[in-house]
Image: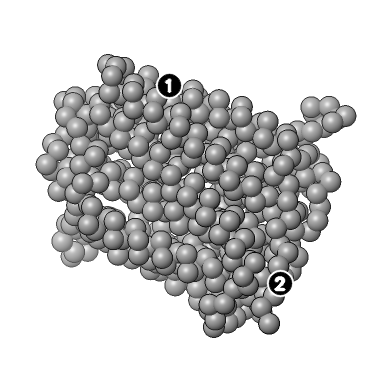
Amino acid sequence: MNRSIKNILVAPKSFYTRVLAIAVPIMIQNGITNIVGMLDNVMVGRLGTDAMSGVSIVNQLMFVFYLCIFGGLSGIGIFSAQFWGKQDHKGMQYTMRAKMIGAIVTTIVASLIFWYGREQLISLFLHEGGESGNMEVTMSEGLRYLRVMMIGMLPLAITNVYSSTLRETGDTMVPMKAGIIAVFVNLIGNYVFIYGKLGFPAMGVVGAAVATNISRFIEVAIVVIWAHTHSNKHKYIKGYLSSLQIPDKLLKDFAIKGFPLLLNEALWSMGVTALVQCYSVRGLAAMGAVSINTTLSNVFNIAFVAMGNAIAILIGQELGKGSVSDIKLYAYRLAAFSVEISILSAVLMAVTAIVFPSVYNTTDEVKMLAQYLIWAYAFFMPSMAYTNAVYFIIRSGGKTFVTFLFDSCYSWGVEVPIAFLLSRYTAMPLIWLYVCVQIIEFFKGVIGFFLVKRGKWINDLTVYEDVK
C-alpha cells in the first residue's frame, strides 16, 4: 500500500458527505431514543434503588432479545444492501420475507423463555453486598415490569424488519421520524403513568412498561403504513408476503451467512449480560451503578453505533455495485472516522459524569460507583468505536463465521471467564473489575485490525437462481 497514512485515513469531502447522509439520521433517531431512555431511567430512578435495579435487570434480558432480532435481521440484511446496490427488487422481496419469518419465530421463542423462566433469570442478578437495596422488593418490581414489557416484543420485532430494510436501501429518514415520535410518546407516557398524572393512577414501574408498549405500537404503525403506501419507491414491499417461497440457494445462503450472526448476537448479548451478572456479585449497589453508567453511555455512544450501521450499508452497497478495487481503503477511512467521532463523545461524557449520578434518588455509594464507571467507559470509548467498526466491516462481506469467532467467541472464551474468576475469587472492587474487562476488549480491536488488513471479507453475495 503506497499511500501515506494521511491519504489512507483522510478522505475527500464527498466521502464524508455520503457517510453522514446515512449516519446522521440514525444518530438522530438513536440519540433521541437514548436520551428519552435516559429520562425514562431517571424517572424510574426517582422511585428508588430497588425499582431502578429491577427495571435494569429486565432491560438487560430484553437487550438479549433485541440483539437476537438484530442479529437475525443483520445476517439477511447483508444481502439486502447488496441487492439494493444491484436494484434487484425480487431479491429484496426474498430478504424481507425471510426477515419477517425469522423475527416472528425469535419473538415466540424469547417470549416462552421469559415467561417460564422469569424468576430464575431475574434472581441471577440479585446478590447481597454494600449498603443499598432490598432483594425481595427488587425481584417484585422486576417481575411486574417484565410481564407488561413482553406485550411490546412483537411490534418491536416487526418495526425492526421494516426499519432495517429501509435503512439498507439508504432510506433512513422514515425510521428516524417514526422513532422520534415514538420516544416522545414514551416520554409523555412515562410522566403520566409512572407518577399518576392527568387523572391516571400512579403505576410505578408498570407505568414505565405501559408507556414503552404504547410507543412501540405507534412506531410500528407509522413505519408499516408508510412503507406500504410508498411501494412505488420501494417496489419490493408490494406483495412480499403473498408467498413464503424463497429460492433454495438463497435460503441456504441466508442460513449459512445469517445463522452465525444470529448466534453471534445472541451469544454476544448473553456475554454482556454475563458480565453484568459478574458485576452484580458486588451487590445491589453495583447493579444500580451499572444501570446509571449504561443509561449515560447509551446516549454518548450513539455516534459510533450509528457509524457501524452506516459502515454495513455503505460497504454492502459498494460490494453489490462491484466496486471492490478500493474497498479496503474505504473501510480504513470509515473506521478512522468512527474513532474520531467517538473521541469527542468521550470527552463530553467524562464531563457529564461529574453531575449526572446526582439526579438519581439513590445512595451516595451508588452515585460514586456510577461516576467511576462512567469515567472508565469514556476512557475506553475510542477503542470500542474501532472494534465496532471492524465488526461491521468484516460482516458486510458475508464473513459471518469470522465475525462469530471475533465477537462472541472472544467474549465467552476470554472476557467472561476472566470476569467470572475476578468477581468470584478476588475482592477486586467493582471499578477495577470493570477496567480489566475493558482492557481485554482493547486487544480484540488489535486482532480486528489484522482481519481487515487481510481483506478476506471482500465478497459479492448476490448471485442466485430465481424461483420461476
From the image, which quarter does the C terminus lie in? bottom right
Query: As drawn, which residue projects farthest toward the top?
Result: 427
Answer left or right for 312 relative to 298.
right
Residue bearing the label numbered 2? 465
Residue bearing the label numbered 1? 436
| Residue shown at the point (62%, 33%) measured from the top left | 448
Residue 375: where, in percent of width, then height?
43, 25
| Residue shown at the point (69%, 75%) measured from the top left | 466
Q: Which circle, 1 or 2, is nearer the viewer?
A: 2
Residue 10: where, in percent of width, then height?
77, 34
- Mark earlier in primary sequence (1, 2): 1
Residue 103: where, in percent of width, then height?
45, 64
Residue 329: where, in percent of width, then height?
78, 39
- Mark pair 1, 2: CA separation: 50 Å
| Residue shown at the point (15%, 61%) measured from the top left | 201
Rendered position, 115 above or below 336: below
Question: Disc 1 marks which amino acid?
Answer: Cys
Q: Mark 1 falls on what kind of element?
A: helix
Q: Mark 2 falls on what kind of element?
A: loop
